[in-house]
Amino acid sequence: MRIQIEPDELAVAARAADAICDVVRASPSTTLGLPTGATPVRTYAELERRVAAGDADLSRASAFAVDEFVAPVREAPGTNAAFFARHLRIRFHELRCPDAAATDPDAEIRAFAGAIRHLGGLDLCVLGIGVNGHIAFNEPGAAADSRARSVALTAESRAAHAEAFGSLDRVPSTGMTLGIADLLESRRILLIAQGHAKSAIVRVAVQGPESADVPASWLRRHADVTWLLDAAAAAQLCD
Ligand code: PGA
């Protein structure tokens, strides 16, 4: 595993955008896995800037959300589909989210994972990490061999999305996620973490035991994973 530490969030966003653009330049019709949340917002803004400036072109790339809420309406405010519509306004060949309003969420996310496999898998999967160690919606307890499925969201994860949904009681209690095994099948993984609030879980995930208690620790089984951290998120790592 590589650990790359940058001074601040802006530098992290620039390096993350570099990593995405490098993959797309090498293979324009690449397949990407993309996260939502606060973490990638600056990275996506940087990608938008590069595309607008003519420095990047993702129009042949396919992008797939790594998770989604189960909600009554596909693009309800707070869903990942709504997040992408707001924060990643660039042209892809396709940018797909699981249908939040699918009547059978397990079938929906399994078909979604199947569509990724049909394209040959993710060339690069970008991930954030929750303060409880989740990656995508693989909450603590997620096994290394877990597959795409619907999941009950923890109180911590729901609280992190209260603002986006307008209030905590509007945050869905169920999500859909690619499983740990699905994520580990990506050719490359880039995990981004920023800020002091992530420093304790980054340390446990990177330097503690591999454990379902900290789903991000399963990334240590992957041959090509980069942890891209700002100095605050890296503050508790030991030499
Ligand atoms: P955040 O969430 O980017 O909003 O901190 C990270 C995650 O849950 O993956």
Image (cartoon, rainbow, N blue to C red):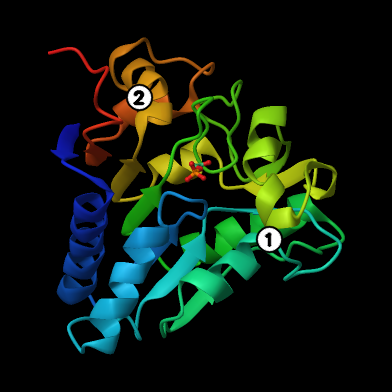
The type of residue carrying mark 2 is Ser
- Quarter in which the N terminus is drawn: top left
In the displayed structure, 96 sits above or below 238; it is below
Give left or right: position of 69 versus 173.
left
* Percent position of residue 117, x then y: 48, 60
Label number found at residue 79: 1
* Percent position of residue 76, x then y: 76, 67
| Residue closer to the observer: 190 or 201 | 201
Does the residue tagged 2 have its C-beta within 8 Å of any atom of ligand 1? no
| Residue closer to the observer: 182 or 86 | 86
Give left or right: position of 152 versus 143.
right
- The part of the image, by quadrant, that contains residue 183 is top left
Q: Dot 1 surroundings within 10 Å: few (below 14), some, or many (20 or more)? A: many
| Residue at numbered disc 2 | 199
In the displayed structure, 72 sits above or below 206; it is below
Mark 1 and mark 2 lie on one chain; the one further toward the N terminus is 1
Could one spot residue 202 in this view of the protein? yes
Front: mark 1 or 2: 2
| Picture residue at 16% right of the left edge, 37% below the top | 5
* Percent position of residue 139, x then y: 60, 30
Residue at the far left in the pictured view: 239
- The part of the image, by quadrant, that contains residue 58 is bottom left
Element at label 2:
helix
Could one spot residue 122 in this view of the protein? no
Element at label 1:
loop
The type of residue carrying mark 1 is Thr
| Picture residue at 26% right of the left edge, 64% below the top | 20
| Picture residue at 76% right of the left edge, 55% below the top | 166
Q: Dot 2 surroundings within 10 Å: few (below 14), some, or many (20 or more)? A: many
* Percent position of residue 107, x then y: 75, 55
In the displayed structure, 97 sits above or below 161; it is below
| Residue closer to the observer: 116 or 48 | 48
